[in-house]
């Protein structure tokens, strides 16, 4: 339903890159250039400033992008409402998820959601918490999933899942065979942490601060941009880290890492749905919100079943 030239323009304007827009639209780069040129001729105004390899929006381009996004939202709402008349939910779900959620929780969540809403089309981006919130504010996505509450008043947050962060060490680490350690022992440990802007990083820093362990006093070995990178570094013996329990089932089952208790320290966090402040989202985003808010029991059961299956396979292999 969306005007094709506007769709091409929106892809270029949001990526500020003709090659990326062409890949996103499954077009050749010359075809994208041709559509932009035709649109500029139709409007009698330059929309993009192309100086060398740099692409920037002109004042006219910024105005058109604002309206192009509104037109896209309206066509998607129309499609959703028309499908709803027949009892189906359709349209495009433009979703953003922070890295840990996107990798470890979102596939299960979307698998169940698609069973209920098979006609909904998915458009998904991932990044750290700050990046997802920024994408929401810039209207690149309609709803987001992040690790902790947003630090903005123009974004509304609703908890949808309770997650726990645990201390993970290499299997060969001296703490691996201990029942637990004292929080003060973390001060001298080579700690692997997520980058600044990550929701996980913020939760860890706040939890450790309660025990007098400020970030400056820690032995920060590395900052990494994904939970997967931290797990791989722990397996390689490069340090220890506080990681979502949902992310380490495979490695624990394989015996490459160990979970170590920290006396008196339990880090629980609420994973949140976020959308612009104001009315609740409608259409596909609204359907996903309602689904996610009621999914915690089934999602937790799915994670527990996955852990049990991996543990069973490990026992059979070792036997």
Image: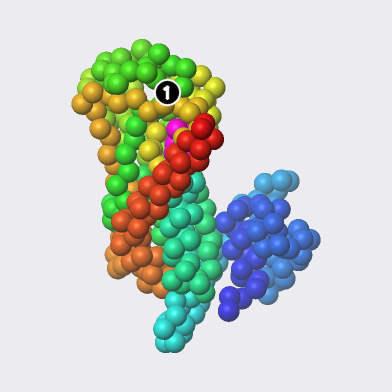
Left/right placement of residue 213 relative to residue 141 reads: left
* Residue shown at 32% from the left, 55% from the top: 296
Residue 109 position, x and y percent, is 43, 57
* Residue shown at 29% from the left, 18% from the top: 181
Quarter occupied by residue 46: bottom right
Left/right placement of residue 206 relative to residue 104 reads: left
Magenta highlight range = 248-252
Tell me the chief SS of the magenta region. helix
* Residue shown at 45% from the left, 55% from the top: 108
Left/right placement of residue 275 relative to residue 247 reads: left
Q: How many marks?
A: 1
Height in image: 48 above or below 223?
below
Q: Is residue 272 visible?
A: no
* Residue shown at 37% from the left, 18% from the top: 177
Q: Pick whichever, 317 or 175, lies toward us.
A: 317
Characterize the local packing of mark 1: few (<14), some (14-19) or many (20 or more) Cα atoms within 10 angstroms. many
Q: Pick whichever, 58 or 224, lies toward us.
A: 224
Left/right placement of residue 15 relative to residue 258 reads: right
Residue 122 position, x and y percent, is 53, 64
Looking at the image, which residue sits at the far front?
A: 319
Q: Which residue is mark 1?
A: 169
Height in image: 18 above or below 54?
below
Q: Is residue 301 visible?
A: yes
Residue 15 position, x and y percent, is 60, 53
């Amino acid at each position: 339903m969306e005007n094709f030239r506007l769709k091409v323009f929106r892809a270029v304007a949001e990526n500020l890159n003709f090659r990326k827009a062409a890949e996103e639209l499954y077009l050749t780069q010359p075809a994208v250039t041709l559509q932009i040129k035709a649109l500029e001729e139709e409007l009698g105004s330059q929309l993009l400033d192309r100086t060398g390899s740099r692409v920037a929006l002109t004042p006219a381009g910024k105005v058109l992008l604002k309206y192009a996004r509104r037109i896209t939202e309206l066509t998607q709402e129309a499609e959703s409402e028309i499908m709803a008349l027949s009892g189906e939910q359709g349209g495009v779900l433009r979703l953003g998820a922070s890295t840990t959620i996107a990798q470890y929780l979102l596939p299960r969540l979307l698998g169940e959601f698609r069973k209920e809403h098979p006609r909904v089309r998915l458009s998904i981006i991932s990044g750290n918490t700050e990046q997802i919130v920024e994408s929401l504010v810039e209207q690149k996505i309609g709803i987001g999933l992040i690790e902790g509450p947003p630090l903005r008043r123009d974004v509304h947050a609703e908890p949808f899942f309770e997650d726990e962060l645990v201390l993970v060490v290499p299997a060969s680490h001296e703490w691996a065979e201990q029942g637990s350690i004292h929080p003060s022992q973390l001060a001298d440990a080579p700690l692997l942490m997520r980058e600044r802007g990550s929701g996980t990083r913020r939760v860890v820093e706040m939890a450790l601060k309660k025990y007098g362990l400020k970030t400056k006093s820690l032995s920060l070995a590395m900052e990494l941009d994904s939970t997967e990178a931290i797990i791989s570094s722990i397996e390689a013996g490069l340090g220890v880290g506080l990681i979502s329990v949902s992310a380490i089932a495979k490695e624990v089952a394989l015996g490459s890492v160990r979970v170590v208790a920290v006396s008196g320290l339990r880090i629980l966090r609420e994973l949140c749905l976020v959308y612009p402040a104001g009315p609740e989202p409608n259409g596909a985003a609204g359907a996903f919100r309602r689904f996610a808010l009621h999914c915690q029991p089934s999602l937790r059961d799915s994670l527990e079943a996955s852990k049990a299956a991996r543990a069973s396979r490990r026992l059979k292999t070792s036997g």
